[in-house]
């Protein structure tokens, strides 16, 4: 138990979680690249940016040596592997499924935990740790969306809680670390973040968009879900028509 709670063990667990996030977001980048009909280079570029962008932004802001993605040779191959899996297999139909939503929520939490822990390990305080935990979790996706010519999803009005969940997870990790229970912080952060994100998706929890904002009623949530399903069906029909053509 003492070995499991040691700083070295916490750092190794954080690295594993970080790499899991790199693979999953490289995969998501590849899925989006397929939707835009990009070539192989496009898959690689979007997948690598999606997988490594948040961590590189974090490490540059920390100014604690070169970004981990450039010094740990596992990172780039893992991001490329995620991109190539999406290149080889059409996974667009699975993106909105339960399994992918669970994976996305877990990865968001993984990265928030990793970013907060790495910031604390660099000697910074709680506020930078919370902010850089969030940046690690959402930075790559934001840069990816900009490259694809769209507004980053975390900024869209009516989008279920995402960056807010990363802030919450980072806060849990920081509090537990300050109490001397970093390992518990990893488990609690990932568990709480995954649960809150999935609940936000299911109940359509959103932040206020303007001063006239009001909480969504049950009927509003039902209509929004119906609209999302309708849009997904339209995309599926368009893809099918293009394939037949």
Image (tube, grey):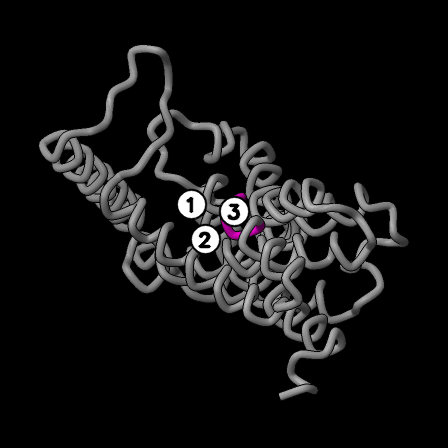
Residue 45: x and y in percent read: 65, 49
- Name the front one of labels 1 and 3: 3
Residue 95: x and y in percent read: 35, 54
Q: Which label was assigned to residue 1? A: none
Contact, mark 1 vs mark 3 (Cβ under 8 Å): no
Q: Is residue 203 above or below residue 210?
A: below
- Residue located 69% across and 68% down the image: 77
Spatial distance from mark 1 to mark 3, Cα to Cα?
Answer: 27 Å
Residue 153 in the figure: left or right of residue 212 = right
Secondary structure under tag 2 reads helix
Residue 22 in the figure: left or right of residue 219 = right
Quadrant where the C terminus is found in the figure: top left
Residue neighbourhood size for the residue with mark 3, other residues' Cα within 10 Å, grouped as few (<14), some (14–19), many (≥20): many
- Residue located 40% across and 58% down the image: 194
Q: Which span is picked out in magenta?
A: 166-170
- Residue located 17% across and 38% down the image: 230
Residue 135 in the figure: left or right of residue 70 = left
Residue neighbourhood size for the residue with mark 2, other residues' Cα within 10 Å, grouped as few (<14), some (14–19), many (≥20): many
Q: Which label was assigned to residue 31? A: 2
């Amino acid at each position: 138990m003492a070995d499991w709670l040691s700083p070295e063990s916490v750092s190794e667990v954080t690295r594993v979680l970080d790499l899991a996030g790199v693979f999953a977001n490289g995969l998501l980048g590849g899925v989006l690249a397929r939707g835009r009909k990009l070539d192989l280079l496009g898959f690689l570029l979007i997948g690598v940016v999606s997988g490594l962008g948040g961590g590189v932004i974090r490490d540059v802001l920390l100014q604690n040596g070169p970004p981990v993605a450039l010094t740990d040779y596992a990172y780039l191959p893992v991001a490329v592997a995620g991109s190539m899996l999406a290149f080889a297999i059409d996974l667009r139909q699975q993106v909105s499924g339960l399994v992918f939503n669970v994976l996305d929520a877990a990865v968001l939490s993984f990265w928030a935990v990793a970013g907060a822990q790495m910031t604390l390990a660099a000697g910074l305080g709680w506020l930078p740790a919370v902010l850089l935990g969030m940046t690690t979790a959402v930075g790559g996706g934001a840069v990816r969306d900009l490259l694809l010519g769209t507004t980053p999803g975390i900024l869209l009005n009516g989008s279920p809680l995402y960056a807010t969940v990363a802030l919450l997870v980072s806060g849990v990790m920081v509090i537990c670390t300050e109490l001397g229970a970093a390992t518990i912080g990893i488990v609690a952060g990932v568990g709480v973040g995954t649960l809150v994100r999935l609940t936000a998706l299911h109940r359509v929890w959103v932040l206020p968009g303007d001063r006239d904002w009001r909480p969504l009623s049950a009927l509003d949530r039902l209509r929004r879900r119906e609209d999302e399903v309708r849009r997904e069906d339209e995309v599926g029909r368009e893809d099918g028509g293009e394939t037949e053509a």
